[in-house]
Amino acid sequence: MSQHPNLEQALKYYFGYDNFRLGQRQIIEQALENRDLLIVMPTGGGKSLCFQLPALLKKGVTIVVSPLIALMQDQVESLRDNGIAATFLNSSLNGHQTRSREEAIVNGKVKLLYVAPERLLSDRFLPFLDLVHHQVGISAFAIDEAHCVSEWGHDFRPEYRQLKSLRKRYPDIPTLALTATATDRVRGDIIQQLGLKQPSIHTASFNRQNLYYEVRQKTKNAYAELLEIIRENEGSGIIYCLTRKKVDELTFKLEHDKISALSYHAGLTDEERAKNQTRFIRDDVRIMVATIAFGMGINKPDVRFVVHFDISRNLESYYQESGRAGRDGEPSKCILFFGYGDIKTIEFLINQKPDPQEQLIAKQQLRQMIDYADGTDCRRTIQLGYFGERYAGNCGNCDNCRSPKPVQDWTLEAMKFLSCVARTKERFGMLYIIDVLRGAKNQKINQNEHNKLSTYGIGKDRSVEEWRILGRSLLHQGLLEQTNDGYSVLKLNALSWEVMRKQRTVSLAIPIAPKITVEHESEKAAEVEILMQRLRSLRKQLADEQSVPPYVIFQDSTLKLMAQVQPQTKAEFNKLSGVGSHKLAQYGEKFLAEIRAYRTEQGLTTKEDNSKPAVNLPSETELYTYQLYQQGLNVTQIAQKRNIRPSTIIRHLCDLIDKNQQIDINQLVPLERQQKILQVLEVLGDIALTPIKDYLGESYSFDEIRLVREKWRRENRK
């Protein structure tokens, strides 16, 4: 068939778009040539158009197989809105409606017919399909949500497996399989299970750049954090929970806190679910709290945030569910609360599966999900890698890239931990090992005479939580095994011995949050909340003065730490996670003044700030950059080695100059350029970087200016 020059005209005519998105035109051309196709495109990538436009340009009717009633109605409604002859047949219709629609189809008045797989393959429907084929012709079968055919997919549906019989019945009608997520394994399965003949495979990038990904540890304050997310973000949000009970509890709490929210789960009637979904789509209600029963194919482009209040069962589901945020391409947030209690719930659900093979697959997928939640790499790298797409990292739009956790060398602690597992003969779980390491005085240890081991008490200097983080990390890094018999007994493997023989180092990203022990939890919580509100108003005021969002000043987590720790000196303030030297200099005094004022009003003690030198000690992450710099590596090499952005390395170097470390900036900025920048600084003084850059012109980079300004500041301080 020749090229199709009028496709753009047809696109504009039917759908109002001027141009195709990347990859769409080629797919549509191949569909018009009656090829079998496998189309893998992320949610919001425009995959529906790939079968809808060819359906309008070909003779006959295209049969679209879709697994959810809500999804069908949604798509048919929006097609009809565009004046396109589309209809659906499903259980929501009465006999009269079904007959009149069937008549319209046989009379050639319908171009797209949506139908569920169960109905399509029923004894009553297949003869009707033969009649349609005979009278008007079937132009194609489009199998939407095609991953449902694979038990390796995240939403396996046995009825999808029977769709292969369509191929036998109508061998010459082309089939298009469409899915928003599929690993290589699932793709192979789709081709085989649907009997696709030499299909042309189209895979769009899975990278949704507008989505911000973040994982938070689920603590006692998780609900308060959730409220904060809802109140601080405009627009609609979806909150996913693992169980119906959780959904109902959370909806009740949110309503109580004056947040308009509705529930969605399999325990509600079809009518209630449909009503709630419509109210959410129409913005009558802001928040949908749901189990995974909700959202497959939901067409609401302006969901601004998706919160997983419980961990997902696997990465594919997580990508699909979180991907319901920001389908309009606008910035949106995907936040996952990760608590180890959820894992027990999912493991319980997995163990209910009758098929041992399915259990095995599900456990493997859960492990990958935990690795994602615990991971310290760029979240996109982990996600896209799962779908076989390489991504270099440093996306700048996830928590790990925006605030890399400092990685520490924990080899010595790992050696202690693993040798304790060895000396207790690999017969115990993690908590017992930690008790031995910390020299706990309990009966079981005494009975086993483990209080006489050389490893007894050698880990007193670390908290239970720190040892637990290490233990989990050793498991996730594959340096330690754990039995799956329900007892979770720790077992050593070949890599464990490499660590113990000093042949392998162990790095650990430790979330740095001061542990606060409080006698009167509720009083303290109320106190923290009051101070938090004051700090939040101060942050808002500063943000408004600079016309930036409040989180640019300090993230919520840092604000929370301020309210909990209540630092009163710059040295104490500087220790908070999220406070660098620049922010210390810019905002430290203002926030400290607010904290002191609050403490005075509460009749609490305050102290004056006499600590100057402590502020100027480099942080651990800066020292690591400094070591590499001293070894002669340049900025790009250091950034590559540390897997963080060059601009972050420049910031470290500036902070090191500020802290009186020996940095020779002649290696970093040519002398004549330094002189030019220094001249401008002498004229303009210590001001923001942008006006300096405007003054110097395009050929000067922010990084060069930043370095020279830091050196100039230090010279002027002396």
Image (cartoon, rainbow, N blue to C red):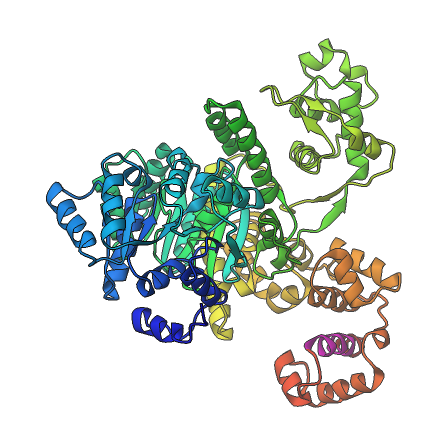
Figure disc tally:
0
Quarter of the image with the C terminus in it: bottom right
- Which residue occupies 23% across, 66% down? 83
Q: Nearer the viewer, residue 338 or 536?
A: 338
Q: Which residue is most to the left?
A: 96
Find residue 337 and report its horizontal and vertical position in percent: 50, 43
Q: Nearer the viewer, residue 185 or 313?
A: 185
Q: Is residue 140 visible?
A: yes
Find residue 263 and report its horizontal and vertical position in percent: 30, 42
Majority secondary structure of magenta residues: helix
Tell whether position 515 is magenta: no
**Range of residues picked out in magenta:** 702-712
- Which residue occupies 40% across, 46% down? 171
452 above or below 166? above
Tell whether position 710 is magenta: yes
Q: Nearer the viewer, residue 649 or 593?
A: 649
Find residue 174 and report its horizontal and vertical position in percent: 41, 52
Q: Is residue 309 visible?
A: no
Which image quarter: residue 436? top right
Which image quarter: residue 121? top left
- Which residue occupies 33% across, 62% down? 58
In the figure, is residue 341 to the left or right of 50? right
In the figure, is residue 468 to the left or right of 185? right
